[in-house]
Amino acid sequence: MLSYQHGYHAGNFADVHKHTALCLLLDHFASNKKIVTYLDSHAGRGFYDLSGEQSEKTSEWKDGFGKLTDQSITTKGLELYTQAVARFQEDHTATSYPGSPALTQLLMQDNHHGVFFELHPAEFECLKENLGSDKRLRLVYKDVQNHLADFMPNRTQDGLLLIDPSYEIKDDYTTIAKLATFAHKRWKAAVIMIWYPMLPERRHEDLKANLKGATFYELIGPMKERGMYGTGLAVINAPEGFDNAFVKAADEMKAILFK
Ligand code: SAH
């Protein structure tokens, strides 16, 4: 039984890092005239309300996205991200925050496809309500570990696979590496991005050891005694220019968030 709900964490420093990388990758595909498939293995509810009960309870977004408002941004990555959130808020409310599905929906072309997996029943219902009317998107209420292959395009088609699990089950650190490796073999052309939390138990080291050919990007927050001290992304098959742009954006992020 899944209990994680991303609403408690939406817009936190890990989301800023991950969603900035996502915006850079979506931007890479933006001018692609061919069919592009965006597969999001762990979608959540699509978007969140930063003034809602869950966000209020943790206030995590205040140390993340909240610190970026009213800042002058200079890097392309952070600019794409903050502008995407601002556009989303104009279309929704000033306190809404787009998760990975809403960012993808916002930045994808009309002939591109999105496939979003979500297994938590209440989160899936919200996802359906939030994004269900867009014909470019397929929302899948299934366990991605067993059904990813059913929704993968052919191996040469362009696209992005975002793997962003909640790591509620300890085995996730090994099964996610297997899922990414399988996807890379089956869908050769895909850019694959895997998120992982950095916790004192350091289970992410097992995941990293089993992700061959990935480049790792890590953002370490201010020293704390408990909980998530950093956030990581593993990227396989990154497009040209991504590394440089994301490293610059992450440096700027660090200077603003942790000064
Ligand atoms: N990618 C989202 C956040 C996702 S949070 C964003 O950036 O906005 C992780 C989600 O994965 C949770 O909603 C959880 O219910 C879902 N999940 C966990 N295990 C899953 C599985 N095996 N298959 C599909 N979804 C799963």
Image (cartoon, rainbow, N blue to C red):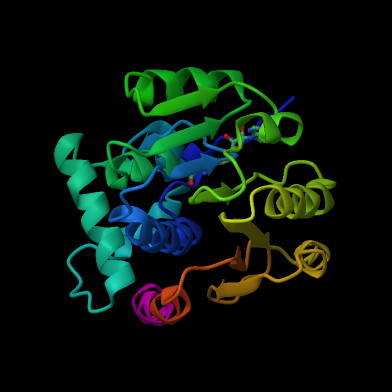
Q: Residue at x 32, y 24 (%)?
A: 134
Ligand 1 shows up in the quarter that is top right
Instruction: Please indicate, yes or no, whether residue 194 appears anywhere in the rendered image.
Output: yes
Quadrant containing the N terminus in the rendered view = top right
Is 173 on the left-hand or right-hand side of 214?
A: right
- The percent coordinates of residue 209 (x first, y second) are 82, 69
Residue 21 is drawn in which quadrant?
bottom left
Residue range of the region highlighted in magenta in the rendering: 248-259
Q: At which x and y percent is residue 124?
A: 52, 22
Q: Position of residue 195 (x, y in %)?
A: 60, 57
Vertical order, 6 against 214 (above or below):
above
Q: Quadrant of residue 99?
A: top left
Looking at the picture, how far across and down is residue 210, in whole percent? 82, 64
Above or below for 159 versus 225: above
Q: Nearer the viewer, residue 230 or 31?
A: 31
Residue 98 visible in rendering: no
